[in-house]
Amino acid sequence: MEIWEFMLVVMRAQATDEQVRNVVETITSIGLKAHEIPGSQRTAIGITGNKGELDPAVFELLPGVAEAIRVSKPYKLVSWEVKTEPTIVKVGSVEIGSGDLVVIAGPCSVESHEQTFAVAEAVSRQGIKLFRGGAYKPRTSPYSFQGHGEDGLKLLAEVRDAFGLAIVTEAIDQESLELVEKYADMIQIGARNMQNFSLLRQAGQMRKPVMLKRGMSANLEEFLMAAEYIMAEGNYQVVLCERGIRTFADHSRNTLDLSVVPAVKKLTHLPIIIDPSHGTGRREQVIPMARAGIAVGADGVMVEVHCQPERAWSDGPQALLPSMFADMMQQLKEIHNVVSNLTVASAK
Amino acid sequence: MEIWEFMLVVMRAQATDEQVRNVVETITSIGLKAHEIPGSQRTAIGITGNKGELDPAVFELLPGVAEAIRVSKPYKLVSWEVKTEPTIVKVGSVEIGSGDLVVIAGPCSVESHEQTFAVAEAVSRQGIKLFRGGAYKPRTSPYSFQGHGEDGLKLLAEVRDAFGLAIVTEAIDQESLELVEKYADMIQIGARNMQNFSLLRQAGQMRKPVMLKRGMSANLEEFLMAAEYIMAEGNYQVVLCERGIRTFADHSRNTLDLSVVPAVKKLTHLPIIIDPSHGTGRREQVIPMARAGIAVGADGVMVEVHCQPERAWSDGPQALLPSMFADMMQQLKEIHNVVSNLTVASAK
Amino acid sequence: MEIWEFMLVVMRAQATDEQVRNVVETITSIGLKAHEIPGSQRTAIGITGNKGELDPAVFELLPGVAEAIRVSKPYKLVSWEVKTEPTIVKVGSVEIGSGDLVVIAGPCSVESHEQTFAVAEAVSRQGIKLFRGGAYKPRTSPYSFQGHGEDGLKLLAEVRDAFGLAIVTEAIDQESLELVEKYADMIQIGARNMQNFSLLRQAGQMRKPVMLKRGMSANLEEFLMAAEYIMAEGNYQVVLCERGIRTFADHSRNTLDLSVVPAVKKLTHLPIIIDPSHGTGRREQVIPMARAGIAVGADGVMVEVHCQPERAWSDGPQALLPSMFADMMQQLKEIHNVVSNLTVASAK
Amino acid sequence: MEIWEFMLVVMRAQATDEQVRNVVETITSIGLKAHEIPGSQRTAIGITGNKGELDPAVFELLPGVAEAIRVSKPYKLVSWEVKTEPTIVKVGSVEIGSGDLVVIAGPCSVESHEQTFAVAEAVSRQGIKLFRGGAYKPRTSPYSFQGHGEDGLKLLAEVRDAFGLAIVTEAIDQESLELVEKYADMIQIGARNMQNFSLLRQAGQMRKPVMLKRGMSANLEEFLMAAEYIMAEGNYQVVLCERGIRTFADHSRNTLDLSVVPAVKKLTHLPIIIDPSHGTGRREQVIPMARAGIAVGADGVMVEVHCQPERAWSDGPQALLPSMFADMMQQLKEIHNVVSNLTVASAK
């Protein structure tokens, strides 16, 4: 386990020899090693030996320095350098990251017994094995419906018993986390809590797998480091979820950043799924973006389904009708077929 | 107390009379009122009477509808429509929002007795009455220093006793919130927790004032609704804090969005301060942006000061040295003088 | 042909009757029609009858007004309301927008006879009919290679003759536009010139089809209005191209915004292709994102191919090798098969 | 004159000695110099000797390489390394960059003789020496008013004669550039043309000073390189102008990025002004942000003034009334006083 350890200090073209010497001495004085790299017009100095964070600005303050550049990758447990096999996360009978097509479906919120069972029945008919539904809803307004809490979780547990569906649901604080761990099969950490480090640590102490959603303004490093928080506590069953970032674009609620999928695959062994429902916020974009998500190589998708979206208590406009969901499933299977054949071919 | 209640449904140019009628009937059937607005080439229909959230997509699904536009402002307690006098938040002997120049200063993290007392002594000498310092530090990496916790809070309490400084410090979860309430004078909710609604609600149940930092990707409505969460629980002593948003610009760590100050002043009676230390992340930008913050009309600034920034355990590159801090204070006083004279002049 | 014509003026809850009357009179005095919409706690006033742009701020300055909201869609020629059949743009023997899989390929820059012919031979072998290659290169630095200009265009014309490939290449100003019109089959307007309205107008006067790339910070309305500039001059043969927007995300050079494809399809009859080479800037993301582009429903993709990317004069890191390109073609055909079967099914 | 020339290639922890050797040989084979930097767990290799652009991806493709990091600053003529005195740009009797408070004012568009003269009279009365006004207007819609062209320029020339005001006005293509050069005193290149490199080069061949506005999605490097394009042609009289970047924030039309001012001052000798009118798009934010702009250390501000904003042909909502402009001038003078005293003090 390690942190990348290089830094490069670039001197100004006019820097004097004495200034270079001073930088070298400063580096040495804090226990690091300096490597001079003389260029034709200026000198750079490589630094090795640092164990933790090293701050460029410490060197940028020294006379004659033009810039200090950090070359650090703080990833440990999430990284391919630590684990060379892809992680497969098992939830119920489903193996996320195994190469199978994984689809998680269900309503945004658990509203009532009737609504929840109706959706569960509809998605179950399509062969779905993972059911989503919110009992704790983070809402922009304190006056909006905030979820049924433990009663909602109990309803989800009934759905599991009735339909054999494993349950994925969000926890928003310590109390709800303990209840979600008790009733559900997979703990969801929402985008707004991606850097709620206290919650991440608690999730790391749970024994159920965690689905971690990317924060709306999180870059890839921050996203992976949030997973690192969970894993550092001992819970290695983490699935990443891209659900859209915040940009100036206003034709969708968020901008679903699909290129993060190959970027994630390059850096980490953890599986990643996409959430086109929250990622677009508009029903007519959900199915095309779900297809694109599977085509780009995601391990699965999570979508919202509602039998009466116009009466949904939250996020109705992005929910698919059961008939649309059935169409989507058919399309995803065909796209997945193409993509998984490719993988097999390239593996030969 | 109210929520704005209008929605406008715009029909397509080719929409038939029957389609218009159908929209009107749908509106009426859910207990709302429809107001037809015939244009020269198409019709729009105004909706009034809704009490809570109304979803445009419900209407966009109806045949003949081009677009439905929400005209809702969900603000209640934060709004000028509820309270017509500016809120003044008292912390120790300081009145934030009173028109006085408010400066909050201190180290990023409470590191040691020596470091904390040295900084406290330095800022105290400049007439500062509010001291900041983190005992709980939200860090991107789980392997970075996370703060001294309760021991840090005790040190801050010692600083209060020794220098007569009121203490502002961050809480990151329920446990730390209770301790911060016990030891400090003002509870800070950090940018990463701006939509940790559970924490906001708990802060709303505390009796100490709250400083709420804007999330890195929060728009103004979300920022104000986060304050609304706190106030809805009964704690009206809320100070907003702009600390930079996430953009593509890479010459500063974040983009300090100063135009939010006049925008906030237009919509809410709550005071707002700016944090140029986190907002820029670069020492050489802190003082210019602090000046700009006072010039734009903020109620105060919060800055980080460290006697040995190159040895700081966190965020050293953005910390001011005590001598720079003294210069800044002088400059802010002069700028504040200009701005407050203007206010007096315009009030006459 | 028309511009949407509604505006909604929302009064404050405390607005007096006289203030409402004043707003109505102002509306009437500038020749527009006012429609009062009384709500339970405040009044809104709909405006109809305006022909051009109407500025919300004009009304927001009036006493008692809370907000004025524009309900305008400025699209004319690009809109489905004007033309109800999808536009098919013919370039050489290829019909973009017809439902066929369209792939445009070639090097970033035309560097030499040898390089250009080698790439042309490689892509031609995969059945490609549209060849791209830059003779005029917009580069961030004035000291970078700026393209061979007319000599490059002549080389492209030779490629057409030798391989039967139609040529797509960028014009950057009036002079190059005239030369591109002379030598090539399709005029490309680059992202940096998407709001170079002078160039757009000139392109509108040409008789060759135009590929218009989305600007890095253009929202959908601005993108479509740029197409409108070209069409307003009489050239209706416009193909849109998504090539990535600028966001904070740093794992790809730009963020390829695939959800713009269904959004474009909803608003306009013009075809849209995607450019995953510029959209990601990283070779390993190009093929996955090309697959995703076809899966989301784009009419085609444009990719860069180079036989020796490590020696490319520009954008080598995003170029595919010929063998990768062959793999990609196979994958895209299979994905396209799935997607076009869906379309046929849904059309029945 | 030079380009920074370093690159750092970081090997994977598991890289073999042979892989390191292969990287070193590749570097040498293309005429560059390799400097090995052995760390405790992996090796990095510094590269020196490259003259132009060097592409990280060339090395990232080699086996065993984790990442290649460019350490290049492409600035030449804009840089402090070439010119150590601040550039002062003279326009009429005004010296931009001299430390004097510079205010450029006038209407968005030149509409009529009456309107233009009325505004000129109003701003002139406040001691303004630089007058702005658009004769060529880049507009999102082809159906919006596009400016009076040469007639507008003639009107501006009349204003110069009548009031002794130097004229700043925008050129949008080669033709208008030649006319602007003929009639005006300073050529403005707008944000949408910041990377219209053809136009930049032509402006570089003119003998009148140029005001270059930052593009809405331009980072600082791109902004300075656009100035480099102008200077590379021999025109060194360039003034930068910050006018807001595009972000998700919707309380202002753009996000005026004031921290770019200290960042610009650190890298270049060119002066920079700010444009709070376009930067905010809302009248009530213009004066506060103008104050902030002077407080942050900008060399001046450019604002729009109109005697009847509600009848302006473009951008009325951001125009100041003459009385507001007079107030602003008073405030800016006082703020400038504070800031320039500081500079004098710090220079001692």
Image: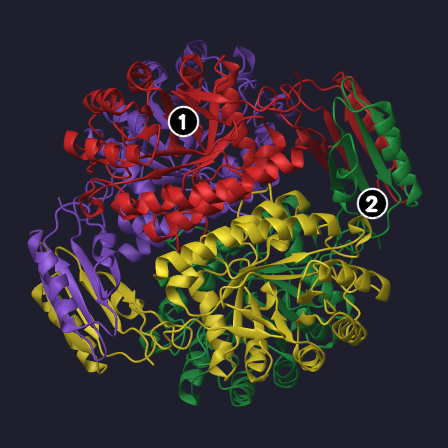
Chain colours: A red, B purple, C yellow, D green
Q: Which mark is residue D229?
A: none
Q: Are marks 1 and 2 in contact (CB under 8 Å)?
A: no
Q: Residue at 15% across / 71% down in the picture?
A: B37
Residue A94 drawn above or below residue A243: above
Q: In x, y percent, where is residue D228?
A: 73, 61
- Which residue is tagged 2? D5
Lateral position of residue A106 relative to residue A334, left or right: left
**A335 or C191: nearer the eye?**
A335
Q: In x, y percent, where is residue D331?
A: 43, 58
Of the two numbered discs 1 and 2 in the rendering, the one whose residue sits closer to the viewer: 2
Q: Mark 2 lies on which chain?
A: D
Looking at numbered disc 1 in the image, what kind of residue is underneath it? Leu
Estimate how packed mark 1 is, as few (under 14), some (14 to 19) or many (20 or more) residues with alpha carbons within 10 Å.
Answer: many
**B155 or B74: nearer the eye?**
B74
Residue A73 drawn above or below residue C49: above
Q: Which corner quadrant of the image does residue A113 belong to?
A: top left
Task: Assign the C terminus of chain C to one quadrant of the image.
Answer: bottom left
Residue D175 drawn above or below residue B153: below
Q: Residue at 85% across / 44% down in the picture?
A: A14
- Which residue is tagged 1? B130
Q: Which corner quadrant of the image does residue D198 belong to?
A: bottom right
Residue B193 drawn above or below residue D322: above
**C126 or B335: nearer the eye?**
C126
